[in-house]
Amino acid sequence: MHDKVMGRLISSFKGSMLRSHGDAFTTLARSIVSQQISVKAAESVWNKIIFNISEISPQTVYNLENSILRNCGLSQRKAEYLQDLSLYFLNKDLNETIWYEMDDEALILELTQVKGVGRWTAEMFLIFHMLRPNILPVNDLGLKRALSIHYNENKPVSKNKIDIISGPWKPWRSVATWYLWRSLDSLPVEY
């Protein structure tokens, strides 16, 4: 491999791999829960949600009292986002049947119509549910931190530098991103 850092990271995590978990709704819901918090904090909140809710589905989440979601550790805003996401699935405003035919940017545009689903959340969905191989979430703090550590002597990394570093990873930037995340936390990032 031409990228020695990436070669070392891949060797360090043999047996680990990026894989899809759950259905589209659950993946998007987990991504919303994980916004702007650490992997460990997100896992803790998600575990409280699944402990308190018998089934993670659009109908179940939509019917929940907001206070139940709040007691699991969600902010008022994130609880509202989950209920809005539920409504999109219940009303069939998101057309899952065509997602595999859509290119990455078109699917990101469709998903970001949902309140609380921004570009980062849509990118997490493309990486973890759709298993799109070439997603590079350039605004992800974990990715930036890992790139700083492994490629830039612990200095901040500009978008231009991210593009240069990630160029050789194409068309597998999602996989490279996942290995960089793994280098930061023993708990694998999963949605």
Image (cartoon, helix red, strand yellow):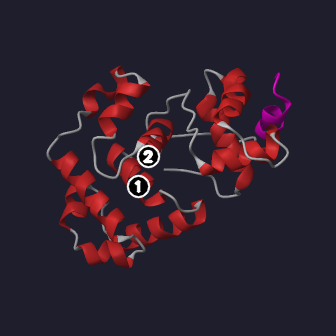
The answer to whether residue 6 is magenta is yes
Q: Quadrant location of residue 64?
A: bottom left
Query: Which image quarter is the N terminus in?
Result: top right
Q: Is residue 18 left or right of residue 9?
A: left
Q: Which residue is mark 2?
A: 121
Q: Position of residue 189 (x, y in %)?
A: 59, 51
Magenta: main secondary structure equals helix
**For the residue marked with disc 2, what is the amino acid?**
Thr
Q: Position of residue 166 (x, y in %)?
A: 69, 28
Q: Which residue is mark 1?
A: 32
- The reply to whether discs 1 and 2 touch (Cβ–Cβ < 8 Å) is yes
**For the residue marked with disc 1, what is the amino acid?**
Ile
**Element under disc 1:** helix
Q: Position of residue 78 (x, y in %)?
A: 35, 63
Q: Position of residue 167 (x, y in %)?
A: 68, 22
Q: Is residue 191 left or right of residue 60?
A: right
Q: Which residues are magenta?
A: 1-10
How packed is label 2: few (under 14 Cα within 10 Å), some, or many (20 or more)?
Answer: many
At horizontal 55% and vertical 38% (from top left) the residue drawn is 137
How packed is label 1: few (under 14 Cα within 10 Å), some, or many (20 or more)?
Answer: many
Q: Nearer the viewer, residue 24 or 144?
A: 144
Examine the rendered structure and indicate whether residue 164 appears above or below residue 44.
above
Q: CA distance from mark 1 to mark 2?
A: 7 Å
Examine the rendered structure and indicate whether residue 122 appears above or below residue 182.
above
